[in-house]
């Protein structure tokens, strides 16, 4: 089994000039938690997940700095959660998305796909062919396809 045989070809994606608002709308509408970011040539330029968004809207902790008898507290966010959430909606997706994206080629073996998903602790893996997004594989896709003939 290879990527092409188990990938979903109807990939929900977002353009690199989109806002986080459009990403969250796609999350809600499609019941998903992450998607690839592509340019005009359908090349993968990033990946944004619910975890990336949570890092921005979550409270950042306060840090205490002690430098030779001088103690200073670097404050966390002054904004309330709702204010931080509203602010991020208008951010460009590339301000939040990860630019370093793990991908696989369409002919990649399922064993290697399982290794990447497990070792890197990611939920989805974009599939590319000649640098172009052609599909996506989730952990569930691997499990369903790898074990369906055993049960």
Image (cartoon, helix red, strand yellow):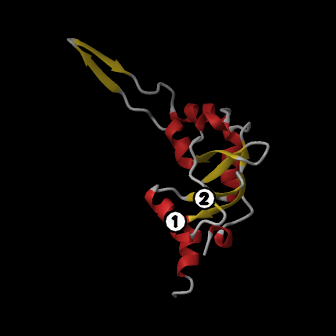
Q: Is residue 126 left or right of residue 22?
A: left
x and y percent of residue 95 in the render? 61, 33
Q: Residues within 10 Å of mark 1 (few under 14, many from 20)?
A: few
> Which disc, if any, is residue 104?
2
Closer to us: 51 or 123? 123
Query: In the image, what residue occupies the spot 67% across and 63% down?
Result: 106
Q: Nearer the viewer, residue 97 or 114?
A: 114
Looking at the image, do the residues carrying marks 1 and 2 touch, with CB atoms under 8 Å apart? yes
Depth check, front residue: 120 or 91: 120
- Inspect this view and state whether residue 12 appears: no
Q: Residue 143, how many percent across, how many down?
A: 53, 73
Residue 123, horizontal then vertical, whole percent: 54, 58
Q: Residue at x 68, y 68 (%)?
A: 4
Name the one closer to the observer, 78 or 18. Answer: 18
Q: Is residue 122 visible?
A: yes
Name which residue lies at 66% across and 67% down: 7
In which quadrant of the rendered view does residue 127 lie? bottom right
Q: In the rendered picture of this protein, how many numbered marks are placed on residues?
A: 2
Q: Secondary structure at mark 2?
A: strand
- The circle drawn on residue 43 is none
Which dot marks residue 112?
A: 1
At mark 1, the secondary structure is: helix
Q: Residue furthest left?
A: 69
Q: CA distance from mark 1 to mark 2?
A: 9 Å
Percent coordinates x, y for residue 126 in the rendering: 63, 56
Q: Residue at x 60, y 75 (%)?
A: 1
Crowd band around label 2 with a 10 angstrom C-alpha radius: few (<14), some (14–19), many (20+)? many
Quadrant in the picture for residue 72: top left
Chain-order first, disc 1 or disc 2: 2
Q: Residue furthest right?
A: 40
């Amino acid at each position: 089994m290879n990527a092409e045989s188990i990938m979903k070809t109807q990939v929900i994606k977002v353009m690199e000039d989109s806002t986080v608002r459009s990403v969250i709308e796609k999350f809600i509408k499609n019941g998903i938690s992450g998607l690839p970011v592509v340019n005009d040539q359908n090349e993968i330029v990033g990946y944004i997940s619910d975890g990336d968004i949570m890092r921005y809207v979550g409270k950042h902790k306060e840090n205490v700095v002690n430098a030779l008898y001088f103690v200073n507290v670097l404050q966390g966010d002054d904004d309330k959660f709702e204010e931080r959430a509203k602010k991020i909606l208008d951010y460009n997706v590339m301000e939040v998305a990860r630019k370093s994206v793990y991908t696989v080629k369409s002919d990649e073996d399922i064993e290697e796909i399982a290794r990447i998903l497990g070792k890197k602790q990611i939920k989805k893996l974009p599939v590319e062919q000649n640098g172009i997004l052609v599909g996506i594989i989730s952990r569930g896709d691997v499990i369903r396809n790898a074990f369906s003939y055993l049960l």
